[in-house]
Structures are given as C-alpha cells and as structure tokens.
Image (cartoon, grey):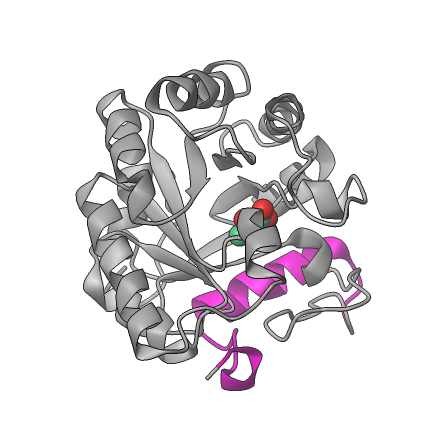
Amino acid sequence: MKHPETPVSRPKTIPDLWQAQQPIVMLTAYDASFARMADAAGVDVLLVGDSLGMVVQGQRDTLAVTLDDMVYHTQLVRRGAPQALIVADMPFLTDNTIESTLHHAGRLIQEAGADMVKIEGGAVKAPIIRALTDAGIPVCVHLGLLPQRVRQLGGYRVQGRGAEDASRIIHDAELLADAGAALMVVECVPNGLGTRIAQSVAVPVIGIGAGAGVDGQVLVMHDLLGMNPHPARFVRDFLRGRGSILQAMQAYGEAVRNRSFPAEHEGFV
Ligand code: KIV
C-alpha cells in the first residue's frame, strides 16, 4: 500500500495486505455479532485486542488478560466472521521466551482460528518474531506506546517525541521487519514519526494515534461507537449523527480509505 491509488477490492490474505492499493481498515472485535457486522461493513482486518481487558472486562489496563481469554474471544470472532483476516493479541507475559511464545501463539492459531498474532515490543522481540515466522506463524508487531508496559511508563503517553526516541522506534521497526514481521501497529507517536516509520519499512504500518501518513488505521470498536467517556485525542465517534452501528463502521472504513481520518488534530506533534 506504499503507493495508494484508486480504490480496489478488499485484501483477503496476508500477502494481499502487502499489495493493498488503498489504506487498510482494521478494527477491534471481541465477539461474534460485532465481528459479523464489522466484516459486513467492509473492515479489512479484525483485531482481537487485549484491550478487551478494559472495554469488555472492565479492568483498568490490559495486564490481567489471559491467554485463555484471548483464545475464547478469538473463537467467538472467528465464528462471527469465518472468512475475515483475524489478528489476535499475545497477552502480557505470554511472549517472553521462544518456546513459550511458539506454544501460546500456536493455540491462538490452531485452537482459536487467528490468522496472525500481535506482539508488543521492540528490538528485544526480534528473535521471537524470527522464530514464529520461521514456524509459519505470521506476526504483527506493536510499536510506539506499548500498553502492556503502562506500569513502567507511568501512563498512556505519546512516544517518540525526542529525536533519540524517534530514531530508536524507527530502528526497531527496521529490525523487526528484517525479523519477518508481516504487519505493524504503531500507537501514539507524532504524526511525522508515523509517516517516517511507514516510509522506512516495506511492511504495512497500521496507525492508532500515528497520523494519516501510514498504511492503514486501527481503532478500538467501543471508541468508534462513542462508548469511551474519556476518549483519547485520536478517537473519533463514528456513531454520532448516524443511524446504526453498521453505518458507523462503514463511515469509519470510508474515512480511513479516503484518508479523511485521522485529521491532523486527531494526532500528535
Ligand atoms: O489491544 C488493542 O486493542 C490494541 C489496539 C489499541 C491497537 O492493541
């Protein structure tokens, strides 16, 4: 998608994502009904995010989410959207060693029906990403703000504002691309840095709070539906002024594809 042109058909496989001719539309889903609707609305990739800890389970962060939780919710999403491209998050502490990560990721693929697993982290995760890729498990890496590190970070803060930090994130992206990453999510970085990351790697880069200069966007479904009482700056309520959830999801897809979402002010400098 590095050179978006006129709208074409939706990507249906991971190689399709690399060839996509328009921005990739990703949305979280945690159950069958919403997964079915998002798929019907034309969302390209469903993410079973560990954000389910917050928006479904009511936890204060994602750290309490277990692998069994992820397997269960991924199974529900797969049932609702049998043909969709599904990415499932590796929850906190399930991706620390190569052996345990292979085992846990294997469950998400074999037992739960995910197409790809998502791993938070930078350069330190390169050997794990290489091992998963060599084993035939596609990996989406998550860079920038890492919600599983919220206790270390002291909050959900914008990352990569300083030159050194920005260079480190770009370096990590390049390293993880070399390690075989099939997709990247970049969260909460200045708009300009989001664009630089997308230009630095051939891997499609999906942004959340990373500006419009990336290869696609992801939102948490509850944010898109205006259910977050304290929405982040990068959130837009797509249900506002629309008659149904389906219409809200369709509007999100259209706004991502025509790059009217996110607007400049819905990102960071
Ligand atoms: O868990 C999640 O929903 C995510 C998105 C915020 C990208 O990782």
Q: Taking 36 as reference, is 10 above or below it?
A: below
Q: In which quarter of the image is the N terminus?
A: bottom left
Residue 36 drawn at (x, y percent): 65, 37
Q: Where is residue 91 in the image (x, y as percent from the top left)?
A: 56, 34
Number of numbered tags placed on the structure image: 0
Q: Which residue is drawn at 46% across and 84% down?
A: 269
How far across and how far down the image is residue 204, in percent?
A: 31, 54
27 or 69, nearer to the observer: 69
- Magenta span covers which residues? 242-268
Identify whether 176 is placed above or below 1: above
Rendered position, 167 above or below 100: below
The quadrant in which residue 195 appears is bottom left
In the foreground, 132 or 74: 132
Would you say residue 11 sits in the magenta stretch?
A: no
Residue occupying the point 54% across, 27% down: 82
Residue 46: image location, x then y, percent: 53, 42
- Which residue: 50% across, 77% down? 260
Depth check, front residue: 267 or 148: 148
Determine which quarter of the picture holds residue 162: bottom left
> Is 250 in the magenta?
yes
